[in-house]
Image (tube, rainbow, N blue to C red):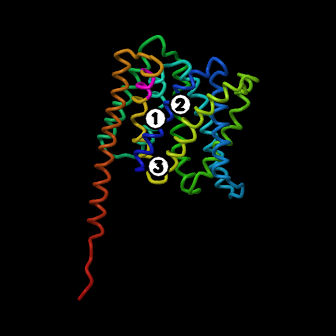
C-alpha cells in the first residue's frame, strides 16, 4: 500500500476506535479505556513480533521515549474526548502534527496555511458551551505529545526495521498507564464484557493504525507525515456526526474546514517544494557522458 494510504487508514482507525471507546467510558472512564487499549495492544504486538531485550542504550532511550509519549497522548486525548465533541478534540490535537509539518519551511505559502489552520482552531475553541477549558487543555497536551511522537517514532522506525520496536514501546506505554486505569476503574477493568469491547478498540485504534503509521514513517519524512495527517480533524468530525450524533455549530464546521483547507494547501506546497529541490539537484548534478 502507498505510504499516504497507510497514513489515511491509520487516521480512520484511530477515529473509529475513539468513537467506539465512548461505550466504555461509563464503565471504566478515560484512564481505564487507555489502560485496556494499550495493554491489549501490547499483548497482541508482543505475540506477533516476539521482540527481544538486547538493544543498545540509545535504542532503549528511543523506545522509552516513544512509549511515554504514547501513554501521555492517550490519557490526555481520551480525557479531551470525554469533555469535547470528537471533531473539536481532534482538531485541537492536530495542531501538534501540523506544527511539525510547518517547522523548517521557508516558503511564504506555508506560513499562510499555518495561519489558516490556527484560525480554524480558534473558531472551534471559541464557540459553544460544550468546549470547556479543561477539555481544550487536554486536547492541546495530546497535540504536543502526538507531534513529539512523530519525531521520536521516525527515529524508532529507522533504528528497528520491523514491528519489534513498536511492540516494546506500546508495552512501556501500557505499564505507565495501567496504574491510572486501576485507580479510576478498579476491578471493573477486567469484566468480560468490558474486555471484549476493549479488545476491538485495541485492534482498531492501536494495533492496525500504529503499525500502518510506523511503516509510513519509514518511507516519509516527519514533515510530510504531519501534512498527511491533515484530514484527521475532518474525519473525526464526520465520524462524530455519523456514529455519535455530535452536531457541530456552523462556526465549528468552518473551523474544521479551515484546517482541512490549510492541510490541502500545505500538501500542494510541499509537492512544489519537492519539485523545486529535484530541479535544483538536477542543475547542480548534470548528467555526464563518457569520453569517446
Span shown in magenta: 236-241
Please give the name of the residue rendered at 40% of the width and 36% of the height, measured from the top-left corner: 230
Q: CA distance from mark 2 to mark 3?
A: 20 Å
Classify mark 2: residues with Cα within 10 Å, few (<14), some (14-19) or many (20+).
Answer: many
Callout 3: SS? helix
Identify residue for label 2.
17
Image position of 288 with respect to 27: above or below: below
Identify residue for label 1.
12
- Please tell me whether residue 243 belongs to the stretch shown in magenta: no
Identify residue for label 3.
216
The answer to whether mark 2 and mark 3 are in CB contact below 8 A is no
Majority SS type along the magenta span: helix
Q: Quadrant of residue 25?
A: top right
Callout 2: SS? helix
- Residue 155 is situated, as x and y percent measured from the top left of the image, at 55, 52
- Residue 76 is situated, as x and y percent measured from the top left of the image, at 59, 28
Classify mark 3: residues with Cα within 10 Å, few (<14), some (14-19) or many (20+).
Answer: many
Amino acid at each position: 500500500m502507498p505510504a499516504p494510504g497507510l497514513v489515511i487508514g491509520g487516521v480512520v482507525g484511530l477515529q473509529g476506535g475513539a468513537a467506539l471507546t465512548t461505550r466504555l467510558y461509563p464503565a471504566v472512564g478515560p484512564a481505564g479505556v487507555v489502560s485496556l487499549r494499550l495493554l491489549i495492544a501490547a499483548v497482541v504486538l508482543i505475540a506477533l513480533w516476539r521482540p527481544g531485550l538486547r538493544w543498545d542504550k540509545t535504542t532503549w532511550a528511543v523506545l522509552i521515549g516513544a512509549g511515554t509519549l504514547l501513554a501521555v497522548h492517550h490519557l490526555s486525548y481520551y480525557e479531551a474526548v470525554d469533555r469535547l465533541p470528537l471533531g473539536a478534540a481532534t482538531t485541537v490535537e492536530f495542531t501538534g502534527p501540523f506544527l511539525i509539518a510547518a517547522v523548517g519551511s521557508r516558503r511564504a505559502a506555508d506560513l499562510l496555511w499555518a495561519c489558516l489552520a490556527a484560525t480554524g482552531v480558534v473558531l472551534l475553541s471559541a464557540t459553544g458551551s460544550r468546549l470547556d477549558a479543561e477539555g481544550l487543555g487536554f486536547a492541546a497536551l495530546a497535540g504536543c505529545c502526538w507531534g513529539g511522537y512523530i519525531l521520536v517514532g521516525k527515529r524508532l522506525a529507522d533504528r528497528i526495521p520491523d514491528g519489534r520496536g513498536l511492540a516494546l514501546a506500546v508495552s512501556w506505554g501500557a505499564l505507565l498507564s495501567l496504574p491510572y486505569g486501576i485507580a479510576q476503574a478498579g476491578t471493573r477493568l477486567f469484566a468480560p464484557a468490558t474486555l471484549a469491547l476493549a479488545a476491538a478498540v485495541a485492534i482498531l485504534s492501536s494495533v492496525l493504525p500504529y503499525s500502518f503509521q510506523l511503516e509510513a514513517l519509514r518511507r516519509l519524512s516527519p514533515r510530510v507525515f504531519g501534512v498527511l495527517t491533515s484530514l484527521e480533524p475532518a474525519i473525526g468530525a464526520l465520524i462524530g456526526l455519523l456514529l455519535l450524533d455530535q452536531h457541530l455549530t456552523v462556526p465549528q464546521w468552518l473551523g474544521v474546514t479551515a484546517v482541512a483547507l490549510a492541510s490541502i494547501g500545505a500538501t500542494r506546497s510541499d509537492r512544489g517544494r519537492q519539485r523545486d529541490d529535484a530541479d535544483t539537484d538536477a542543475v547542480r548534478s548534470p548528467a555526464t557522458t563518457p569520453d569517446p
